[in-house]
């Protein structure tokens, strides 16, 4: 992005690139959490949910591409080392120590809800001033909302399955 493009943004570019670096860090952590969780997952509906979690992982990676490109366009430097991801990101990372599918889904749900807050904050911060970043943030926010809904639906399906099994055993 040229100098004039940056001048007309109407936002603190340093603050914005800091927010974007936090988002970038969270996207890398989310990618790995989805990817490794899908690989480690055990339990009912695994064969149906695993490919979907891997798709979510790919989408998180695509979010990282959008965010890193925007940081560079703004003249910033993207976070350069994985060691900084946990320092910069607020969403954290939950290792799949318990491979049971519900545990994995709850970990991913927690991450999605954090991402929703991150991108809502970015959308609010850039609304009416930085239209490009605002569009990126709202596009990613929409996908994060879809991910949250997918995970909530899977958790609900598993709960129903467990209730049906209890009824059969009674």
Image: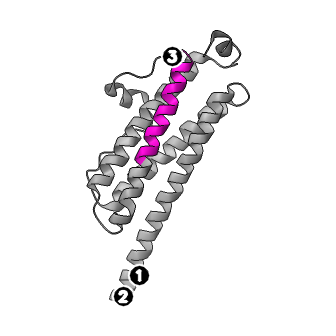
Mark 3 element type:
loop
Q: Judge the density around disc 3: few (<14), some (14-19), many (≥20) Cα neighbours within 10 Å.
A: some
The residue stretch that appears in magenta: 57-75
The residue that mark 1 highlights is 164
The residue that mark 3 highlights is 76
- State which quadrant residue 93 falls in: top left
**2 sits left or right of 66 in the view:** right
Task: Using the numbered discs, state the Cα–Cα distance from disc 1 to disc 3 in whole angstroms.
Answer: 54 Å
Q: Judge the density around disc 1: few (<14), some (14-19), many (≥20) Cα neighbours within 10 Å.
A: few
Q: Nearer the viewer, mark 3 or mark 2?
A: 3
Q: Position of residue 140 (x, y in %)?
A: 56, 41
**11 sits left or right of 52 in the view:** right
In terms of sequence position, does the residue under pointer 3 or pointer 2 come before the other?
3
The residue that mark 2 highlights is 168
Q: The N terminus lies in which quarter of the figure?
A: top right
Q: Are marks 1 and 2 in contact (CB under 8 Å)?
A: yes
Mark 2 element type:
helix
Task: Using the numbered discs, state the Cα–Cα distance from disc 3 to disc 2 in whole angstroms.
Answer: 59 Å
Q: The C terminus lies in which quarter of the figure?
A: bottom left
Q: Are marks 1 and 3 in contact (CB under 8 Å)?
A: no
Determine the residue positioned at 37% across, 21% down: 80
Tell me, yes or no, whether the highlighted magenta stretch contains residue 73: yes
Q: Position of residue 149 (x, y in %)?
A: 53, 57
- Indicate whether 156 appears above or below 85: below
**167 sits left or right of 75 in the view:** left
Determine the residue positioned at 52% across, 32% down: 66
Check the image and tell me how it is coloured.
one colour
The outermost residue toward the front is: 2
Q: Position of residue 163 (x, y in %)?
A: 41, 78
């Amino acid at each position: 992005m040229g100098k004039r493009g940056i001048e007309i943004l109407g936002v603190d570019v340093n603050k914005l690139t800091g927010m974007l670096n936090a988002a970038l860090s969270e996207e890398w952590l989310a990618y790995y959490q989805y990817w490794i969780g899908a690989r480690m997952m055990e339990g009912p509906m695994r064969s149906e949910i695993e490919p979907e979690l891997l798709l979510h992982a790919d989408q998180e990676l695509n979010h990282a591409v959008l965010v890193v490109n925007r940081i560079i366009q703004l003249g910033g430097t993207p976070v350069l080392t994985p060691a900084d991801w946990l320092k910069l990101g607020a969403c954290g990372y939950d290792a799949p120590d318990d491979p049971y599918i519900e545990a994995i889904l709850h970990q991913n749900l927690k991450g999605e809800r954090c991402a929703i807050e991150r991108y809502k904050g970015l959308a609010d911060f850039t609304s009416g001033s930085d239209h490009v970043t605002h569009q990126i943030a709202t596009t990613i926010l929409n996908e994060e909302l879809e991910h949250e809904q997918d995970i909530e639906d899977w958790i609900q399906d598993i709960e129903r399955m467990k209730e049906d099994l209890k009824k059969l055993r009674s």
